Image (spheres, rainbow, N blue to C red):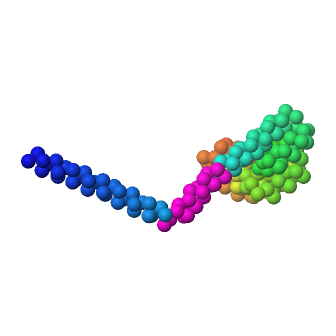
Amino acid sequence: MSIQDDVKYVKSELSGDEKILESAFKLETLYKKYKLPIWGTAAVLIFFFVGSGIMDGMRNSRLAEANNAFLTLQKKPGDTAALETLKSKNPALFELYSFSEAVKKKDVATVKVLTASKNEVIADSSRYVAANFENKEANTKLYKEMAELEGAYLAIKAGNTEKAREKLELIDARSAVAPLATLLKHATLKVK
């Protein structure tokens, strides 16, 4: 009985080894058949990851240069080299810096130029500030309630209390400018 068990065991082992060899031959045949697509896919993946790593490195380097230029401009606002570096390396930060400086200096011309910015926040803020510099009503999304409040104030100054009340009614009671709107509403009552 023990010899028969040994023979069965050896047979099963040989059968397992045959299966392993058979699958190895199938794998080799499959590899030979699809060798070019396998290596092509591997090369594309390698190029993709290496390329994206290089692009990330270049982008980080460009942003670091722009940040250094921005820090230099904060210390020395007249540094033209830093201004050009900021303009070429990070146009969005350049527009923000230009907006900030124009507001500080009350430079209406620069603010008006920035109203055409591709950055909606800069463009909208520039429209609001330009309107304030010129004492006009602003058409803005970000400062809507402030613009309504200022429009009401301008209407009161012009003597048009009805228009002022209409503008003040547009301001939400939960707004941060609601107390000022209430004060201006009282001012319109006294102006009558």
Q: How many marks?
A: 0
Residue at 74 percent of width and 43 percent of height: 61
Residue 180 on image: x %, y %: 70, 44
Question: Could you say which is closer to the camera, residue 91 or residue 13?
Answer: 13
Residue 71 on image: x %, y %: 80, 36
* Left or right: where 171 falls relative to 12: right
Residue pushed farthest top? 75
* Left or right: where 30 falls relative to 49: left
Residue 151 on image: x %, y %: 77, 53
Majority secondary structure in the magenta region: helix
Residue at 61 percent of width and 48 percent of height: 173
* Left or right: where 142 falls relative to 106: left
| Highlighted range, magenta | 33-51
Residue at 84 percent of width and 45 percent of height: 85
Residue 165 on image: x %, y %: 71, 55
Determine if residue 138 is in view. Answer: no
Residue pushed farthest left? 1
Q: Quadrant of residue 67?
A: top right
Question: Could you say which is closer to the camera, residue 72 or residue 95?
Answer: 72
Residue at 35 percent of width and 56 percent of height: 21
Determine if residue 101 is in view. Answer: yes
Question: Could you say which is closer to the camera, residue 63 or residue 114?
Answer: 63
Q: Quadrant of residue 65?
A: top right
- 123 within the magenta span: no
Residue pushed farthest front? 3
- 43 within the magenta span: yes
Question: Could you say which is closer to the camera, residue 28 or residue 70?
Answer: 28
